[in-house]
Image (cartoon, grey):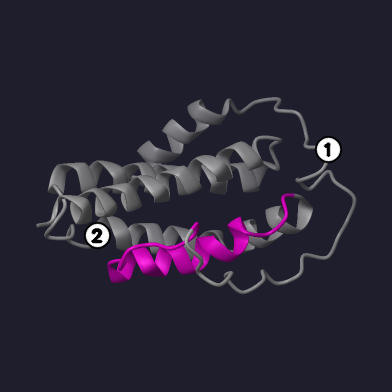
Amino acid sequence: MHKTLLGLALVMIGCGGAARPTSTGPGAAPEAAPPPPPAPAEDEAHAHPDLPPALAAFHDVLAPRWHMEPGPARFEATCEAIDDLVEASDAVKGAPPPATVEAEAWAAAADELETGVVVVAMVCEDGSAQFDEAFASLHDDFHRLLGLLEGAAADAP
């Protein structure tokens, strides 16, 4: 399964001669990657519904890195946490869907999340200039799952 996703990711990011980034990849000026800041306090713009445990764990890895300033430190912090992102996305995919969400929709969104992590991992590995785009896409994949939860909550009596 991971080999299939890896192949898909290669096609998606257009490997082979990608330009080195000017500010967010290994080609950038060396800068020590500080540890990611703690996740910001949940405000209304960032509030999430009660998350299933696996999705909450994914959020705990993603959020501090997502909320860092774009640039080399964010690239480094995210790439250093790629194993945690892989583990967390595997847990989301392996967990049963919430009872309030359509199982097929949840499974499809969890597959997209897993693919998004694979793409970010590949971008980290090759230092591609597409890091910011791949990371934003992964964040969108996470929010697709949130949207399913929020839709289910909105449909509740």
**x and y, in percent, of residue 118 in the image:** 47, 46
Type of the residue with mark 1 = Thr
Q: Nearer the viewer, residue 125 or 107?
A: 107
Label 1 element class: loop
Quadrant in which the C terminus appears = bottom left
Residue appearing at x 36%, y 41% in the figure: 112
Type of the residue with mark 2 = Gly
Tell me where the magenta segment starts and ends, as one range: 45-70
Q: Is residue 147 above or below residue 92?
A: above
Q: Is residue 144 above or below residue 9?
A: below
Q: Nearer the viewer, residue 25 or 150?
A: 150
Mark nearer the N terminus (2 vs 1) = 1
Disc on res. 94: 2
**x and y, in percent, of residue 129 in the image:** 71, 35
| Residue on which the image places disc 1 | 22
Name the side, left or right, on which 14 lies relative to 35. left
Quadrant in which the N terminus appears = top left
